[in-house]
Image (cartoon, helix red, strand yellow):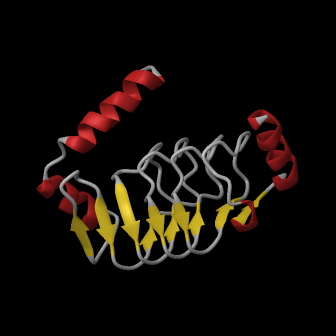
Amino acid sequence: MSSFVRQNWTFLYNKFMTEQEIHRICKEYNIENYSINPDRSIDVNGDVHLQYNTFSQLPLKFNKVSGYFDCSSCFALSTLEGSPNYVSGNFNCSWTWIESLEHCPLYIGGGLYAYHTKLKSLYGYNMYDKLHCDNKEKLILKNLNSQT
């Protein structure tokens, strides 16, 4: 399946996911204290623990997480699509297959941890003081040079 088809299928799937399906997925991944928004994204009052799963993309669209968000050690995860827009704590996507920070949260109250990834670009992220990753300086220089 091409990435274009996969991305559009994912968008349509999430948009038309029923509340019952969202509740089932939240139960499967032990996500508690959540509310479902009209756009089918979810807000979570607390932490989200998704580490050590086998999905290639996040199973839900998250909006706000009032804690930390951990999708580390999801060794097949290749995109941050579905990540929360807002995370009050840390955002950890270490030990994944992501190559860019596109779709990462717009606001992260703590740090963004992306160690041991395939990160080649910081596209989508510019709060360098909160970034913790391998080759951080090299990636920042590459990102700054691409903006000029």
Of residues 61 and 140, which is closer to you in this image?
A: 140
The image position of residue 136, as x and y in percent, is: 82, 54
Q: Work out whether 22 lies above or below 145.
A: below
Which image quarter: residue 30?
A: bottom left
In the figure, residue 83 lies in which quadrant?
A: bottom left
Quadrant of the rendering where the C terminus is positioned: top right
Which residue reaches farthest top?
2
Residue under the image location 47 percent in, 25 percent down: 3
Residue 87 x, y percent position in the rendering? 48, 69
Counting from the top left corner in percent of width and height, residue 59 is at: 36, 51
> Relative to 19, is 111 on the left or the right?
right
Q: How many marks?
A: 0
Q: Is residue 136 left or right of residue 70?
A: right
Q: Residue at x 65, y 58 (%)?
A: 94
Looking at this rendering, what residue extends furthest in the front direction? 148
Say whether residue 119 is left or right of residue 108.
right
Quadrant position of the N terminus in the picture: top left
Quadrant in the rendering for residue 76: top right
| Residue occupying image coordinates x 38% and y 22% | 5
11 up-or-down from 85: above or below: above
As drawn, 131 above or below 81: below
| Residue under the point 56% across and 74% down | 109
Tell whether 15 sits left or right of 104. Answer: left
Q: Provide residue 131's location: percent of width, then percent of height.
A: 71, 62
